[in-house]
Amino acid sequence: MVSKLSRRRFLKAVATTSATGLLAACGGAPAAGPSTAATSAGGTAQPEATSATGGAAATSATGGTAATSAVGAAGATPASAAVTAEAAVGPTPTPAPTPTTSATRVVGKGDVTITMWVQDFGPAITMFEQAAKTVSQKSGKVSVTVQPVPYPDLMAKILPSVAAGTDADIMMGYTDWYVATDVSKLFLPLDEYMGGRSELERIIFPSALTTLDTPQNKTFYIPWAAGVRAAAATVNVNHYKEKNLDYAKFTTFEDYVAAGKQLTIEKGGKITRAGLSPYSASLSLLKTWIWQMGGNFYDKQSGKWNFATQEGEAAAQKLYDLWWKDKVTSFELFSVEYEGFTQGLISTEFDGAWTAGVQEAGQPGLKCDVMPTPKLTGAKQDVVYPEHMGVITVSKRLANDARKLQPSIEIVKEMLKPEGLLFLSESYSGSLMSKQLYDDPRIMKTKYGPISKRVAEGTWPRARYPQDHVANQTPAQDELYRALRKEIPIKDALANMNTYLNEQESQARERLKG
């Protein structure tokens, strides 16, 4: 077992050298984050929007919140992160309390007290609370405090709190926050408590357990929800009906491009409706397509990134052509892709399956549907990169606290049962990671159950993760955007991406060695 001192030293290094990188996991790319109009009826934040790649939206399938715009996440969070990072390396590293828009709940009564931190997102709060209530009622001696925390504050406080030993017993987070860390030094290994790896893979889609590079093949996080940006195509149903197009029959990405040409509207030499927009998902689509073409962009063993390959150039060119050859979208049409879709300016987006629920809630009359993104014509392998996901972790402290350990594990188990997830699909249209949920016929009777099931079963068997260590990939994504906007050549953009990502990877690996 790692000593508290070595864990703290490790986390000090992370806090001081990569606070900005970790924050950028929820930062938005230029002109791509959703506004506060994205808030769902069921809560203040929607799990999915900031991408694992530094994503384009400020809300996330696994990152971001609809209530936190790209400006809010990128602009407000750094200050709080600096405070908590500084606290983590001080003599008494106690994270400052963070404001919440939802009241803290106390569930049950008893002398065994358990604390839970959850993103301030209505359905997630309810899920945590219901699981706590079930366990506390069975035990009769467990009291659970459920504390909702706004997305940027939760992101900023977890690592410093772990370093200080003041973390909650059970925490919700996102895989993006931990890619540049050694998760074995952060959280409790859950395999033995959850029935072993084989049992976890029976309950959870196995590919969802491969997001992070985990030592000894141990499981230190439980995936529960993902918006799967780039792995899902969200369509405006009415637009497709106008042209009598059946997106359910599309088998290749090129089918969406062909439909996009028919759906695009141009007036006076300017596009007034984009038939297809890949903006938010650009970097993740680039990665997906390189894999599908038989190439690679990251070597896990050496830690080397390389987008400047034949496949990388071909994938980038395919993205470029959507603007300048196929002409199915325009940089002048909307300032925020998410809002552009909500306003009917876009017929097809790849911002993640999560968007359907919140966009319909925010725009009366809007009818959305979501399909798994199909492979390219002639793809050598059918794989997708569905970005990051929401996860549940348990404090490493509990290894030495037998009274808290068992009820905490029971709470986590409750969160994976259909009974604890079915209600989420009434408002959440993204993927939930429990295979048992989709085997339950009740899922098809909920509002977004059919979409969630279709997306999950069409994504996770194809999902692939590079297991890199760069938390903030926004600067690399920005270089890709420059090429797509004709500001620099594609080759220059790919070279710039390599330079940045290799520098960051090298720095992360040096920290991990320490």
Image (cartoon, rainbow, N blue to C red):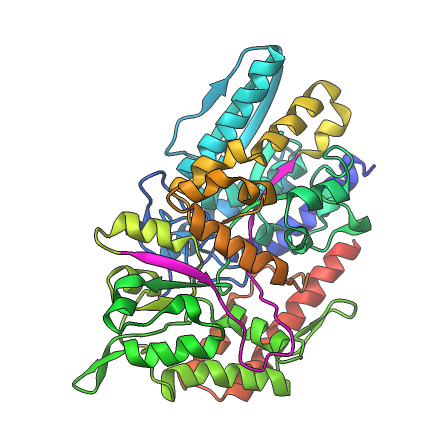
Classify residue 184 as left or right of residue 204.
right
Residue at the image position 36 percent from the left and 49 percent from the top: 357
Looking at the picture, does residue 314 appear above or below residue 23? below
Q: Which residues are magenta?
A: 367-394
State the count of labels: 0
Viewer-proximal residue, 324 or 30?
324
Quadrant of the rendering where the N terminus is positioned: top right
Residue at the image position 57 percent from the left and 81 percent from the top: 494
Residue at the image position 61 percent from the left and 43 percent from the top: 159
Q: Is there any visible trace of residue 242 in the rendered image?
A: yes
Where residue 348 sits: x, y (%)? 36, 68
Q: Is there any visible trace of residue 483 in the rendered image?
A: no
Query: Does 390 appear in magenta?
Result: yes
Main SS class of the magenta portion in the image: loop
Looking at the picture, does residue 442 appear above or below residue 71? above
The quadrant holding residue 313 is bottom right
Residue at the image position 21 percent from the left and 54 percent from the top: 365
Where residue 188 sits: x, y (%)? 72, 37
Query: Does 438 appear in magenta?
Result: no
Viewer-proximal residue, 453 or 149?
453
Where residue 404 sits: x, y (%)? 68, 21
Classify residue 490 as left or right of residue 396.
left
Residue projecting furthest to the left: 268
Where residue 137 sits: x, y (%)? 56, 14
